Amino acid sequence: MKVLVVEDDPFIREMAVTGLEDAGHEVIEAASGGEALRLLQAGIAVDALLTDVRMPEANGWEVARAYRERFPDLPVLYVTGYSEQMQPVPGGIIISKPYRMSQVINVLGK
């Protein structure tokens, strides 16, 4: 499964990328919402999206909506350290930070 990890915190992004790769997933990473949107515009296709909510350029809600327009059934996992107004795409799952990679792996499956 090809997973796009969108996270502006380098430490958390690296943890997610490593955990997903160790579980056998192919991973593409973006350091901001804007970078994730540029990957979409470039034609990058993914099987799942793991995105932080609060990020520079575009937030996780905006990233998810853009990817779902192109890939309507794309699984979306949001990770956030804040309690905020939730705007997930239908079927999106919210995971609170700090999170364990096992939570993400269990949701994504193989």
Image (tube, rainbow, N blue to C red):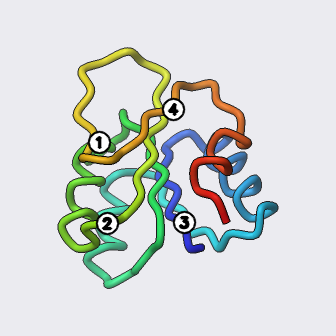
Q: Nearer the viewer, mark 1 or mark 3?
A: 3
Label whose residue precedes the other's in the sequence (4 or 2): 2
**What separation in Å lies between label 3 and label 4 (alpha carbons)?**
16 Å
Q: Which residue is mark 3?
A: 3
Quadrant placement of the N terminus: bottom right
Residue reaching furthest right? Answer: 22
Amino acid at circle 4: Ile
85 versus 16 height, above or below: above
Element marked by disc 3: strand
Which residue lies at the image location 25% right of the left edge and 77% below the top edge? 41
Decide if residue 6 is on the left or right side of residue 36: right
47 versus 59 height, above or below: below
**What separation in Å lies between label 1 and label 3 (alpha carbons)?**
18 Å
Quadrant placement of the C terminus: bottom right
**What separation in Å lies between label 4 and label 2 (alpha carbons)?**
19 Å
Decide if residue 73 is on the left or right side of residue 45: left
Label whose residue precedes the other's in the sequence (2 or 3): 3
Label whose residue precedes the other's in the sequence (1 or 2): 1
Q: Residues within 10 Å of mark 4 (few under 14, many from 20)?
A: some
Which residue lies at the image location 31% right of the left edge and 73% below the top edge? 40
Q: Which residue is mark 4?
A: 95
State if disc 3 and disc 1 touch (CB < 8 Å).
Answer: no
State if disc 1 and disc 4 touch (CB < 8 Å).
Answer: no
Amino acid at circle 3: Val
Q: Which residue is mark 2?
A: 73
Q: Which residue is mark 1?
A: 59
Amino acid at circle 2: Asp
**What separation in Å lies between label 4 and label 1 (alpha carbons)?**
16 Å
